[in-house]
Image (tube, rainbow, N blue to C red):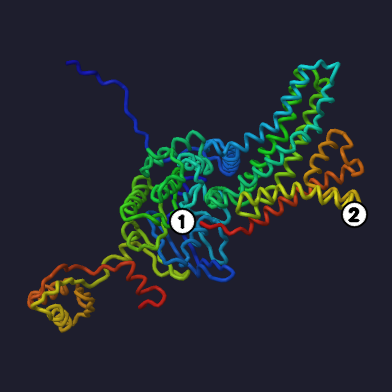
Amino acid sequence: MNVPERGDAQIVERGFQRYEGRRSGVPGAIRSVSWESIRATLGLGRPARNKIFPVISVVIAYLPAVVFIGVAVLIPGDILEPEEVADYPGYYGFIILAIVLFTALVAPEVLVSDRRNGMLAMYLSTPLDRRTYLVAKAVAVAAMLGLVTLLPPVLMLIGYSVENSGPDGLGGWMLTLGRIVLSGIAISAALAAVSMAASSLTDRKAFAAIGIVLLLFATPILAAALVEGADLSPYWRLIDISTMPFELVFRIFGDPGNFPELATWAVLASNLAWTLGGTAVVWRRYSTLVIAR
Amino acid sequence: MPAARLRGVSSIIETRGLVMQFPSTRALDSLDVVIPSGVTGLVGANGAGKTTLISLVLGLLTPTAGSISVLGLDPHERGPELRAQIGFGPERNVFPDDLRAYDFVRHLAEVKGLPRDEARSRASDSLYLVGLGEERFRALGTMSTGQRQRVKLAQAIAADPRLIVLDEPTDGLDPVQRDEMLNIIVQVNRNFGIDVMLSSHVLEEVERVCDHVVALAEGKLVAQGSMAELAGASGGIEIELVEIDDRPTSIGDVAAQLAAAGAGVRRNGTMLSVVGLGDDELFDLAARSVAQSGARLRRLGPHRRTLDDIFADDGPGGAS
């Protein structure tokens, strides 16, 4: 019988060991919590039912861009100019439903869930504190909203450019891209702050989502009633959180927008007020929140 | 944080005159505590101040007065840095139901600062260590209370902390599960040198696994020290006798003989606690008294003070 010679191979059972390596500290904690929040909202690593709403929202947001690019490809440019299909600021009118759905879905999932399922207490026993936790969550909410406010117009820009229907020259292309990015950030910041504020006030995701949808539908109705019904100053339209972010996008693209009677600084101030006001509500709520351990 | 500096500290937690005043109640009152390395039990009834002390250790509350130092750092001033070195297992048993145990442990290890690859491997290692290796890809919502308690311990140790703080880690467990959990906690300390502070209102389990104990009642310190000092031999002996039908006075006779010899005797049923003379003399005296009275002896040994005794003697309304 041949006895095999002893070689260099070993059976290594690693098991639990001490860790002496580098730790990423607070920036790594923020990055990890933001990414996990995005994963949870998109239903990644979760059962299929968690993916339904995110998929519907993303399809609604991206479908028009795909259609417009298809039209630009199939119809010769001398018959139909890309601007006649959809301009960049006008694109948001096609995807407002996706934006409302996402706004109502994302922040409650990101914020309310942590308070209900005990993760907030877990996170606050890590290098995160309340402030850095909220930064991580704000990054997640804004990034998720950017998925529907920023990337579809970028997709349109790339599609038009590939078909030689995009902006003229590198300078024009960069200017358009810059305006798209600025627009996406402006919309995401305002809606993220408002939806996070609503989500900080209740421990039920459904209530938070309903509150956000009501806010998005109620403020334009109230603004119209004040300006058109009660004949008050047109500047009362600035209270309209559903319209002002998109009005600002028109101004970013140098377009007078739907309400040219409003000065651009006032539109900008309205967006800043919603963003800062929402942020203040969230901070106030979380700085006084008693966390069960 | 320089690990060498942390390893040099003699106590892991130290408080001086620590006060935590909430609007309607004083949760901690002038607490002076020194907790050395090892497994430390934080004992006391509900409302004794255990969870408040844990929150202060983690830097989640700011003390009203006094000071606290954990691993040589001020938790309030350097909370993020400190919490990266502490694993925490909360009392609450509520977790994201849809999340798999592995993902939960991996994610929290990443939040504690481990690189992604390291967090992945250590999540598996930790879950194997607590006996959930085969169950690690199950959703938390499908796990039993005992398994969830183990997951809490796994996430507390996954990032290789210097100290783990466990709030009622055996809550909701049956006796067998409780024994297993306590064994794992001791193993974590003995095999990997991770210091442990566990809070509990079950004195027996603290006596069983802890090297040190801090006893609180109504926010005040009742006792602190090593288990050997607090609950060990305290002078005197204990005699447990068997009641015999045809000699009904035998236990009383033993007690009387001991008292006549100058010992202090306290009878509790068939148990006699005897103090007042040297231990050797007490043992001789007890043996003679039992033999002369014809009583039947079940146990004769040194008196051991239990944590129950500490609370009875030193707690609010206690003997001392």
Name the disc covering residue A275, or none. none
Identify which residue is drawn at 49% across, 55% down.
B70
**Position of B235 compared to B286: left or right?**
right
Identify which residue is drawn at 60% across, 42% down.
A30
The quadrant of the image that shows the N terminus of chain A is top left
Q: Report the residue that reaches farthest toward the front.
A: A229
Viewer-side label of 1, 2: 2
Q: Which amino acid does label 1 sit on?
A: Glu
Identify which residue is drawn at 80% across, 19% down.
A165
* Residue A103: % across, % down: 69, 43
In this rendering, the answer to whether A172 lies above or below B15 is above
Name the disc covering residue B91, or none. 1
Graded by Cα atoms within 10 Å as few (under 14), some (14 to 19) or many (20 or more), the crowding at tag 2 reads few
From the viewer's side, name the closer residue of A23 and B129: B129
**Position of A2 compared to A215: left or right?**
left
Identify which residue is drawn at 56% across, 67% down.
B65
Q: Report the residue that reaches farthest toward the bottom.
A: B260
- Can I make out residue A244 in this image? yes
**Which image quarter: residue A8?**
top left
* Residue A117: % across, % down: 53, 50
In this rendering, the answer to whether B76 lies above or below B222 is above
Name the element at disc 1: loop
Name the element at disc 2: loop
Output the chain of dot 2: A
Residue of label 2: A230
**Which image quarter: residue B236?**
bottom left
In this rendering, the answer to whether B286 lies above or below A178 is below
